[in-house]
Amino acid sequence: MLLLAFDTATPAVTAAIGESAPDGAFTLRAGASSVDARRHGELLSPTVQRLTEEAGVTLADLDAIAVGIGPGPYTGLRVGLATAHALADALGVPCHGVTTLDALAFATGRTEPFLAMTDARRKEVFWARYDDRLTRVGEVGVARPAELDTGGLPLVGDGARMYAEVLGAGTADPAPLHPDAAAMAELALLRLSRGVELPAPNPLYLRRPDAVVPGAPKKVRQWVK
Amino acid sequence: MSDLPLILGIESSCDETGVALVRGCELLGDSVASSVDQHVRFGGVVPEVASRAHLEAMTPTVRRALDSAGAKLSDVDAIAVTAGPGLAGALLVGVSAAKAYSMALGKPLYGVNHLVGHVAVDQLEHGPLPKPAIALLVSGGHTSLLLVNDLATDVVSLGDTVDDAAGEAYDKVARLLELPYPGGPPIDKAAQKGNAKAMRFPRGKWGDGTYDFSFSGLKTAVARHVEDADRQGLPLVVADIAAAFQESVVDVLTRKAVDACVEHGVSTLVISGGVAANSALRALAEQRCRDAGIELRVPRPRLCTDNGAMIAALGAEVVAAGLPPSALDLATDTSLPVESPLAT
Ligand SMILES: [Zn+2]
């Protein structure tokens, strides 16, 4: 099964083409990542195009697409999702969601409990707890680092690096900082081969849009009491 | 006709997700999903709400547009998408989707200018646009006067609003009069029962020798009138205020548009954008164009508001002009100048 995976829910734009053999063995055919929080929209499609050339395949050869569903800053996140939806629509292949923190967690290779966290902006982190690289405990959340009970567990991801001072213990080795689509592709193919249903490719926003219902119009006459 | 390329147009610059299929000057099918209902209680478009709605609506809207045209994606020869101007997050959804369709179908991508699209769409209604033409774009987001020498290659900005867009002024005045959002239709309706001469509001930048517009002074004058009536315990004659406000807006718009035609020796005026559906604007524009011997072209309301057809129509022009496609690293540009019908 040939799968294209990408994620744009963090400052990284990461994409990969991976293949699983009938026995489940994973082969990475091509992969690339770059970190530029402001250019997701410019970088993603050319990267995908280049990877197909490197892998010696065409988009029409793909059997499925996996896309990071966040959580992550929304504008970047939507670049990946809009791309994935349209590719899947045009190619007539299934599109699966992968929680961005799950991809990050999988790439750690860890076998003991830890927390993964990414930058949520506004001095908050998106986070989740894992028993090991494959097993998330509970839902992903958004929190102020100072209010997060880490239980002294190791912390990974850019969120851990950014708030190392507040988070204290556990932040000594926060690598990897960003998700890697190679790991995302492997994780998605692993779950698919085991018959685990992947999430729908819909964004995990975790916050409501900022918007205020306006009050009464401002008075224009200064002397009106 | 069928040897002309089939263009898929995608629009997502504000609160409408629009997709259409166009061949030459023929609209074959279109679909629009609007998030306007989600913005009503905020009294204006909330960018994050609009962006979320675009993402949800994009592929279903593409499918509906294809169905309405009786076409398949594999029939598409080129993809045109709004590259700007517009809301950053909203534009990115459409451009990302358009790039993906372009890659997957192996068909060229053209990032085009939303404002010029508002003019190009008239070709779907009235056929090829005479060259040159003057265009007045009026909506909640724009108030622009353009000299259009060629839709694909030569558009000149003559003037713009220096503060609020015309439609924005309608929204703000509607709020003062406790009329619903968007303010255009309810003010237009109220005004039809009112006396426009009952009071006189200022005409911003009237006779200042430019083609620029200003509506914030007008809005303030209406606010002052409402406050004064309130303070003196006088009843608010909403219909009269709406009529007088509307007359002030359309007087300046039509006068400057006709002046531009006369000065540049142009005999065709296109009025487009959401406010083009306004009955007072149409009536006064018709009268003044008739008096000045100018042909007035106003697309039907559905084509005047934001939609995919305008983008596909401009895409068709750009392809016909033989311009090079946009690269896959095409960037969105929230303030793409109107002089760039095709983004680079
Ligand atoms: Zn518009």
Image (cartoon, coloured by chain):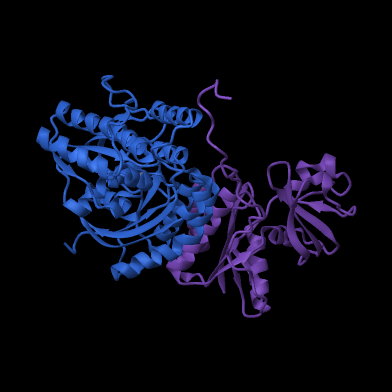
> Left or right: B64 with respect to A73?
left
Of the pair A140 and A48, the residue shown nearer to us: A140
Picture layout, residue B129 above or below residue B165: below
Q: Is residue A196 above or below residue A214?
A: below
Quadrant of the rendering where the N terminus of chain A is positioned: bottom right
Give the position of the C terminus of chain A as an image quadrant. top right
Residue B92 percent location from the top left of the image: 48, 49
Which quadrant of the figure has residue B143? top left
Residue for point 45% across, 72% down: A92
Q: Position of residue A84 (x, y in %)?
A: 52, 61
**The chain in blue:** B
Q: What residue is shown at x 20% (from left), y 38% (from top)?
A: B285
Is residue B6 visible in the rendered structure shown here?
no
The part of the image, by quadrant, that contains residue B160 is top left
User: Can the viewer see residue B136 in this picture?
Assistant: yes
Viewer-proximal residue among B54 and A34: B54
Task: Name the colour assigned to chain A in the rendering.
Answer: purple
Position of residue B109 in the picture relative to residue A172 (left or right): left
Which residue lies at the image location 28% right of the left edge and 26% below the top edge? B211
- Picture coordinates of residue A162 (x, y %)? 76, 42
Q: For this view, does A60 lie left or right of residue A127?
A: left
> Observer-nearest residue: B199 or B209?
B199
Residue B197 drawn above or below residue A190: above
Q: How many marks?
A: 0
Query: Which residue is at a point 55% across and 56% down the rendered structure image?
Result: A80
Residue B67 in percent (x, y) is at 34, 70
